[in-house]
Image (cartoon, rainbow, N blue to C red):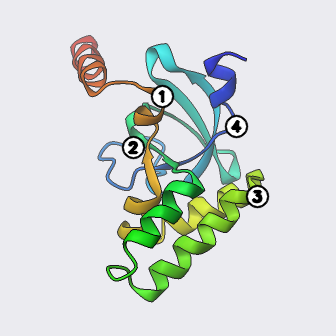
Amino acid sequence: MNDEQSLEGMVVLISPKLLNDPARQRGAVGTVVQAVPAQDDFVVRFKGGVSGLYSSGALLVLKSHEQIYKDVLNSTKELMPFELKALMRMTMLLQSGSKEQMIEAMEIAGLNAELLKRSTEPLSSRIGISAQYQQEANVSLSRSR
């Protein structure tokens, strides 16, 4: 299986901090339907059939249930009861691993900034696309306009 195939079907959340979102899906959960990591291009499909083209830095993916659980154990005093329960629910959903449960876990992650911070990471970090590459790509895109 190549990288493109392993990324297709991945559940992602469009970063709520994304400034320019032509598809207007900031903060929405979707699924990668086409991936070209070499060009940092990812087509994401959302509910209702809307699709958008994004870079890996704009896409958030869930951390493993082990990472989230470890963070919960180390941060119980810092978390609000709602956040603690939500993160624990997410770890249970992620252990099962079905696509529906991944979507539900991602929807929970998007409920507030603290949950998002503790349970997700940029896809660029996961697949190893460096910030320098993204910066170079943005410069070349702005030059081509």
Q: Is residue 112 visible?
A: no
Question: What residue sits 30% from the left and 24% below the top?
Answer: 134
Q: Residues within 10 Å of mark 2 (few under 14, many from 20)?
A: some
Q: Residues within 10 Å of mark 4 (few under 14, many from 20)?
A: some
> Could you say where residue 44 lies in the image, as x and y percent from the top left?
59, 38
Q: CA distance from mark 3 to mark 2?
A: 32 Å
CB of mark 4 within 8 Å of CB of mark 1? no
Q: From the image, which quarter does the C terminus lie in?
A: top left
Q: Amino acid at mark 2?
A: Asp
Q: Is residue 96 visible?
A: yes
Q: Amino acid at mark 3?
A: Ser
CB of mark 3 within 8 Å of CB of mark 2? no
> Could you say where residue 141 lies in the image, as x and y percent from the top left?
29, 17
Quick one: 88 or 60, which is closer to the camera? 88
82 on left or right of 135: right
Question: Can you tell which of label 2 and label 1 is closer to the viewer?
Answer: 1
Q: Earlier in the sequence, mark 3 or mark 2?
A: 2
Secondary structure at numbered mark 2: loop
Q: CA distance from mark 3 to mark 1?
A: 23 Å
Question: Which residue does the numbered mark 3 point to in the structure image?
Answer: 96
Question: Which residue does the numbered mark 1 point to in the structure image?
Answer: 127
Q: Earlier in the sequence, mark 3 or mark 1?
A: 3
> Could you say where residue 125 lies in the image, as x and y percent from the top left?
40, 35
